[in-house]
């Protein structure tokens, strides 16, 4: 693993996180040095169990998993059971057979690892609410500055939200944390928006079956998304999967699949109103403020799906 790019994954491991983590663990160009967990789709403890389960199913190497924040900074959690199931993995009975979480707190371990790294040596990929990252920034900003890219599945991109007309789930769960991260001054914040996994990037029924029938890993990756598939069948009338976290993982690890990504001035709404959790993206530079975050809003569907197939070992 000496020549692999190092990454830390921060996750609220629900079913689409599981697919994304499996993809990362099967990319020979990257080394996942550790995984940190946070509440979001499910409680942090369940997210930790799901992460350990995913590592076992990925069938490659086994990075340590550290438990992080179990509450948001200021607000109460609303879990996404309707999307991911009560256990976050489609209520299929998936559990780890061997692996256990490591001892330290996730934020402590993340900062310790970054302090010991070279500048830019480690990228961070965040798949859930940004509570752990906000705490890390407040505790040791200099250590967080040593990270390379900070790639986040979050925001509606240049489109609309999925929990309100303007808010995407990960940002909406802990908008105060997202505000801290967005306004931190870190140079390479990249939000992969909800819109990046839509349109031609949605997995259709044939693609879903090809992945599922490819082997144990593909079957796990699809079966744990059972609730999302049922939700989509009700919404769209057919089986399909809009995979937010895999789209963010693909953008992070295979940037050749990115079609549109620009840096804008962004501001997170933390007011007590209907736009809470929305991210204002100043597309037309009306505020005359320095851009602070990249927004990746579109992927090349062909390249993106090829990357999914490759990293889930679909022949």
Image: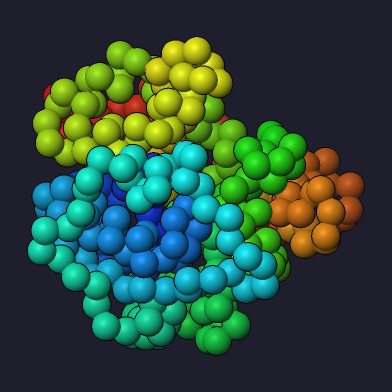
As displayed, is residue 240 above or below residue 269?
above
Residue that appears at 55% across and 21% down: 235
- Residue 54 is situated, as x and y percent measured from the top left of the image, at 23, 51
Residue that appears at 38% across and 54% down: 13
Residue that appears at 62% across and 73% down: 73
Q: How many marks?
A: 0
Q: How is the image coloured?
A: rainbow
- Residue 139 is situated, as x and y percent measured from the top left of the image, at 55, 86
Q: Is residue 193 left or right of residue 5?
A: right
- Residue 296 is situated, as x and y percent measured from the top left of the image, at 57, 42
Residue 290 appears in the rendering: no
| Front residue of 274 and 87 | 87
As displayed, is residue 273 above or below residue 20?
below
- Residue 146 is situated, as x and y percent measured from the top left of the image, at 46, 76
Picture quadrant of residue 268: bottom right
Residue 159 appears in the rendering: yes
Q: Is residue 275 left or right of residue 233?
A: right
Q: Is residue 159 left or right of residue 116?
A: right
Residue that appears at 65% across and 54% down: 172
As displayed, is residue 47 above or below residue 26?
below
As displayed, is residue 200 above or below residue 91?
above
Picture quadrant of residue 47: bottom left
Quick one: quadrant of the N terminus? bottom left
Quick one: quadrant of the C terminus? top left
Picture quadrant of residue 298: top right
Q: Is residue 29 left or right of residue 153?
A: left
């Amino acid at each position: 693993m000496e020549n692999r790019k190092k990454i830390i994954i921060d996750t609220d491991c629900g079913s689409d996180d599981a697919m994304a983590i499996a993809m990362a663990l099967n990319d020979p160009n990257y080394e996942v040095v550790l995984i940190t967990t946070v509440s979001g789709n499910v409680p942090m403890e369940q997210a930790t169990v799901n992460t350990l389960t995913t590592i076992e199913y990925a069938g490659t190497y086994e990075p340590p998993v550290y438990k992080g924040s179990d509450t948001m900074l200021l607000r109460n959690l609303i879990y996404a059971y309707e999307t991911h199931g009560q256990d976050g993995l489609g209520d299929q009975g998936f559990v780890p057979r061997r692996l256990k979480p490591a001892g330290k707190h996730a934020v402590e371990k993340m900062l310790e690892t970054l302090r010991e790294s070279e500048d830019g040596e480690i990228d961070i990929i965040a798949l859930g609410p940004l509570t752990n990252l906000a705490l890390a920034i407040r505790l040791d900003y200099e250590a967080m500055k040593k990270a390379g890219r900070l790639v986040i599945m979050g925001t509606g991109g240049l489109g609309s939200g999925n929990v309100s007309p303007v808010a995407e789930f990960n940002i909406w769960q802990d908008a105060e944390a997202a505000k801290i991260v967005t306004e931190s001054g870190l140079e390479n914040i990249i939000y992969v928006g909800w819109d990046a996994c839509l349109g031609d990037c949605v997995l259709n029924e044939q693609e879903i079956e090809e992945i599922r029938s490819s082997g144990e890993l593909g079957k796990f990756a699809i079966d744990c998304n059972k609730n999302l598939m049922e939700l989509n069948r009700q919404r769209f009338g057919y089986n399909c999967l809009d995979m937010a976290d895999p789209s963010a993982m693909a953008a992070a690890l295979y940037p050749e699949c990115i079609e549109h990504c620009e840096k804008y001035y962004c501001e997170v709404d933390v007011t007590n109103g209907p736009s809470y959790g929305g991210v204002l993206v100043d597309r037309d530079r009306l505020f005359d403020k320095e851009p602070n975050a990249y927004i990746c809003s579109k992927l090349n569907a062909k390249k993106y799906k090829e990357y999914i197939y490759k990293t889930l070992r679909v022949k």
